[in-house]
Image: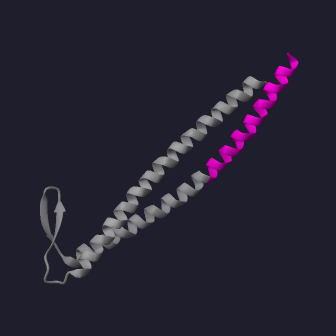
Amino acid sequence: MAEAIQKKLQSELEKYQQLQKDVSKSMSARQKLEAQLTENNIVKEELGLLDSQNTVYKLIGPVLVKQDLDEAKATVSKRLEYINGEIQRYETLLKEMERKSEQHREVLSSLQQEYQRAQGQAVGKV
């Protein structure tokens, strides 16, 4: 009996470890998005300081291409909307993963207790 519980415990532990890796990857991706958000907010502030007489260039590959100021502002605003949406998506994903992680911890705890009881019974029989 103890061996079956041990196998189930090992399986649950592997699932839990994989979930923790996924949480780590998602947190890393969210941090990258936060950095992009900060960078794009700075760009938006800088573009706000310009007037129609200023020239704005956009880097496309190795080439700087002239771009309309309003178009640049619109592009940055859309990028900010997208980044904020992605951050919200990751927030929801991380909350869901945290909930699953808590469930796995509870299952692991109960399986460990069950395994210890089974080992104690096996020792008592010997």
Q: Quadrant of residue 87?
A: bottom left
Tell me the residue at 36%/65% (across/down): 37
The boundaries of the magenta stretch are: 99-126
| Residue 85 on the magenta segment | no
Residue 86 pos. (x, y %): 44, 61
Q: Is residue 11 left or right of residue 126?
A: left
Q: Quadrant of the C terminus?
A: top right
| Predominant SS along the magenta part | helix
Looking at the rendered structure, the number of numbered marks drawn on it comes to: 0
Against 73, is 14 above or below?
above
| Residue 104 on the magenta segment | yes
Q: Quadrant of residue 96?
A: bottom right
Extreme residue in the right direction: 125
Q: Quadrant of the N terminus?
A: top right
Q: How is the image coloured?
A: one colour
Q: Is residue 3 left or right of residue 83?
A: right
Against 54, is 112 above or below?
above
Residue 35 visible in the current orientation: yes
Tell me the residue at 54%/60% (across/down): 92
Residue 6 pos. (x, y %): 70, 28
Against 85, is 61 above or below?
above
Q: Is residue 104 left or right of residue 31?
A: right
Residue 75 visible in the current orientation: no
Residue 9 pos. (x, y %): 68, 33
Tell me the residue at 68%/27% (across/down): 7
Q: Nearer the viewer, residue 48 or 93?
A: 48
Residue 40 pos. (x, y %): 31, 68
